[in-house]
Image: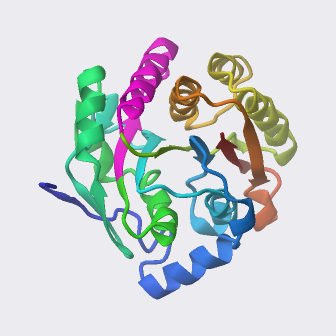
Amino acid sequence: MTSAVRAPAVAGRFYPRRPDELVRDIHTYMPDDQSRRVAAIGCIAPHAGYMFSGHVAGSVYSRLEIPQHCVILCPNHTGMGVPLAVMTTAAWQTPLGSVAADAKLGAELRRRFPALEEDSTAHRSEHAIEVQLPFLQARSGDLSFVPIVVGTSNLEVLQELGEALGDAILQQPHKVLIVASSDMNHYESDAITRIKDHKAIARVLALDARGLWEVVMNDDVSMCGFGPAIIMLTAAKRLGATSSELVKYATSGDISGDRDQVVGYAGIIVK
């Protein structure tokens, strides 16, 4: 039973507040790709305003068979709360309705990884999980999930949480999709961003979590959700992942026309 409701923090800013406008936008960004849908283990989807990255996120979600249970990991943009924050019992509200907590999976994950703390503060104003939910709601009418905000770059901790997440999912009787919410390189030229991003993307496509961490650190790639991506990749390998696919890549410059300072967006499926 859920004990609290997490209210929308960025409705009307990152995406439309009115349900009819939101549904219309989502269907614009999410092509009907039924013949190519896959039962993926995980994915990476961007979390900027829908105007800029909705077409990349929609391309990912249109390719997925969406199960009723998900885990969504995101970076901590606000600096609030504990380094590894989960909400195991609160429902999340969006303009499209309420998304229930997967309390059973959340409790199992906390049991296996006690450093993951129950904390609403890290989630209250964070946008990067919230913007994923309408896409998932549009595809699954009965959704429950575990939200995790990641505020550490420690590789050992990220991999340990990934292993614990994989083990917790293995104990579930149903399919679970792991979503890593991440934008790519920030606020450099379009040309530099594309070079940096494709170095990081190459490591994701190789299912190489450590390699991704090394590229981000050594090549100064300002990929905000590399921690969530490392956790997702580690868990996916534990769950038997063998391949991944870059569904779509773009930068904010493709929309704004400004090529001097852009943000990169990658949509990736892990199978």
48 is within the stretch colored magenta: no
**Residue 86 shows in this picture:** yes
Identify which residue is drawn at 75% across, 35% down. 201
Q: Is residue 231 found left or right of 106 in the rendered image?
A: right
Residue 226 horizontal/vertical position (percent): 58, 32
| Vertical arrangement, residue 265 with respect to residue 162, above or below | below
Residue range highlighted in magenta: 145-172
Identify which residue is drawn at 65% across, 70% down. 30
Residue farthest toward the top in the current orientation of the protein: 156
**In this orientation, which residue lies closer to the viewer: 124 or 207?**
207
Residue farthest toward the bottom in the current orientation of the protein: 20
Residue farthest toward the front in the current orientation of the protein: 173
| Vertical arrangement, residue 116 with respect to residue 263, above or below | above
Quarter in which the N terminus is drawn: bottom left
**Residue 115 shows in this picture:** no
Identify which residue is drawn at 55% across, 54% down. 47
Q: Is residue 256 found left or right of 52 in the rendered image?
A: right
Residue 61 horizontal/vertical position (percent): 61, 59
